[in-house]
Image (cartoon, helix red, strand yellow):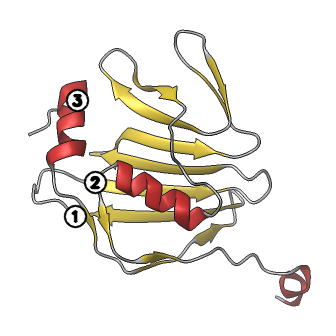
Amino acid sequence: ILSDDLSEDEINQFIENTKKVINERLLKWQYNDKRKIYKLELKVETPVPEYVVRIICEYNPRNGKTKFALLLNDRRIRCLEYGPTVRHKNPNGTKIRGLHKHTWTDLYEDRVAYVPGNFDTTSLEKAFRCFVDECNIEFKGKLLPIRIPTRQEVLDV
């Protein structure tokens, strides 16, 4: 059982050994008009009732920034970010441009990131599948593509 002070070992054990399933079959993005982004929030089922596990996905059509975050009891324990404008600075000062993944450490919580190998970001669906696979989450459904309305459709509203 995880305490409020999550240790790196506990997080890694959770990722590797705890069964995690997304039961929804068709995942549909919702547009957040206030933030001007597409967002998707998913519940992840586990056999442990004390675990509240969610994935929050965000896509910004203005700059292409995409983020998939895994939260455990409201703490971000893994996060994949990519896009042409994405940048990150690690606590030790190293800088990353573009695709990177945040991981949990005892010292810096989720502020450490690295460039992961073998992540296909050619579509949101492929990147999402890579993310859930690496987080050891079972998902048999489909992430529907974002349908951005045409200018005329927006004007017709």
Residue sitting at x 85%, y 81%? 150
The crowd level at tag 2 (other Cα within 10 Å; few <14, some 14-19, many 20+) is some
Return the residue nearer the eye: 37 or 16.
Answer: 16
Q: Residue 94: x percent and y percent?
A: 60, 14
Quarter of the figure with residue 129: bottom left
The kind of secondary structure element at disc 1 is loop
Q: In the drawing, does residue 24 fall left or right of residue 46?
A: right
Amino acid beneath label 3: Leu
The crowd level at tag 3 (other Cα within 10 Å; few <14, some 14-19, many 20+) is some
**Mark pair 2, 1: CA separation:** 7 Å
Return the residue nearer the eye: 52 or 90.
Answer: 90
The kind of secondary structure element at disc 2 is strand
Q: Residue 86: x percent and y percent?
A: 69, 38
Q: Which residue is mark 3?
A: 6
Return the residue nearer the eye: 58 or 9.
Answer: 9
Specify the quadrant that holds the C terminus: bottom right
Q: In the drawing, does residue 28 fall left or right of residue 36?
A: left
Q: Earlier in the sequence, mark 3 or mark 1?
A: 3
Can the viewer see residue 94 in this picture? yes
Q: Which residue is mark 1?
A: 45
**Mark pair 2, 3: CA separation:** 14 Å
Q: Residue 95: x percent and y percent?
A: 65, 19
Q: In the drawing, does residue 50 fall left or right of residue 143?
A: left
Can the viewer see residue 7 in this picture? no
Q: Which residue is mark 2?
A: 53
Amino acid beneath label 2: Val
Q: Earlier in the sequence, mark 2 or mark 3?
A: 3
Quarter of the figure with residue 154: bottom right
Amino acid beneath label 1: Glu
Q: Earlier in the sequence, mark 2 or mark 1?
A: 1
Return the residue nearer the eye: 69 or 131.
Answer: 131
The kind of secondary structure element at disc 3 is loop
